[in-house]
Every structure is written in structure tokens, then in C-alpha cells.
Amino acid sequence: MLGHNVKYSSKLDDALLITIAKKEQRVLLTHDLELYQQAVAKGVDAFYVEGKTEAERLAQVAHRFHIGLEIDMTTSRCPKCNARVKPISKDKIAEKVEKSTFANYNEFWECPKCGQVYWQGAHWMRIRKTLDEAKENSEKK
Ligand SMILES: [Zn+2]
């Protein structure tokens, strides 16, 4: 959502994660110390993410990679498939969202790749809260 090119999967095994990171020149972010050490041993740029809460972990990553903790939908990527989301007019998504969502929100974004529709609903508020907590965490450092 913060506009960074990210690949995420909890299903890939360690060897494959390392291979992908190396091949696509990605930084491997992990909370798994063993995976981190294996990646470093294989010359992959890796970052060991510590922290008890999501906000603490996000603050660490933001600090290390100079990531701004503000969402700008013009640069946001789809959390599901990593494509850039695009604004879509309300009349085009009527069939794709619940009636209450359609009634309560006016701004929508769609992923051109997987078709997922986004709006700034309850889930959005939780994301904002986590970002605010992460910002507080960063400021303490
Ligand atoms: Zn998508």
C-alpha cells in the first residue's frame, strides 16, 4: 500500500525464497533467523525483522529502508499481486462490492491485474492505525 514493489508469500520454502530474492535482486525480509542467515550466506541482501507487534516490525523496516509511512493511492500497489492500483469510477464497481459498501463510499481503486477493488473502509482504518503506531515507534528511536 505504501507504493513499494514487494513479493509476499507464506507458502514458499526457504530455498525458493532465497532463489527468488537473488534472481529478482530483492531484499529478503524475514522474522526467521535461520532463513536470514542462509540468505546472507548465499549473498542475498537480507534484513532480519524483529519486533513484537506489526507496528514495531513496520517501524524497523521503514527506518532501515527510508520508507515513508504515508499511503498515497497514486503509488499504491495491490497487496495481493503487486500491480499498481488505479482509481475507478463508482458506477463501474456496483456489481463487485456489497450494497452497504457501495452506499457508504465514493472513492474506489481497482487492481488492473487481479481485479481486486479497494476502498477506504474499516480495514483501511486498521492499516492507518498500524502506520500511526509505527510512526510513533520510529520517533522513539
Ligand atoms: Zn492485484
Image (cartoon, rainbow, N blue to C red):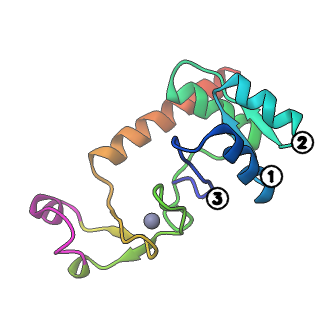
Q: What residue lies at 45% left-to-right and 57% top-to-bottom?
A: 80
Q: Earlier in the sequence, mark 2 or mark 3?
A: 3
x, y percentage for residue 93? Answer: 24, 75
Q: Which mark is residue 125?
A: none
Can the viewer see residue 66?
Answer: no
x, y percentage for residue 125? Answer: 34, 43
**Residue to which mark 1 is pinned:** 22
Can the viewer see residue 52?
Answer: yes
Q: Nearer the viewer, residue 118 or 120?
A: 118
Q: Which residues are magenta?
A: 93-105
Does the residue at mark 1 contact the one at mark 2 (Cβ under 8 Å)? yes
Q: Residues within 10 Å of mark 2 (few under 14, many from 20)?
A: few
Q: Residues within 10 Å of mark 3 (few under 14, many from 20)?
A: some
**Residue to which mark 3 is pinned:** 5
Identify residue type, mark 3: Asn
x, y percentage for residue 115? Answer: 36, 72
Taking the image as shown, residue 101 lies to the left or right of residue 65, namely: left
Identify residue type, mark 2: Gly
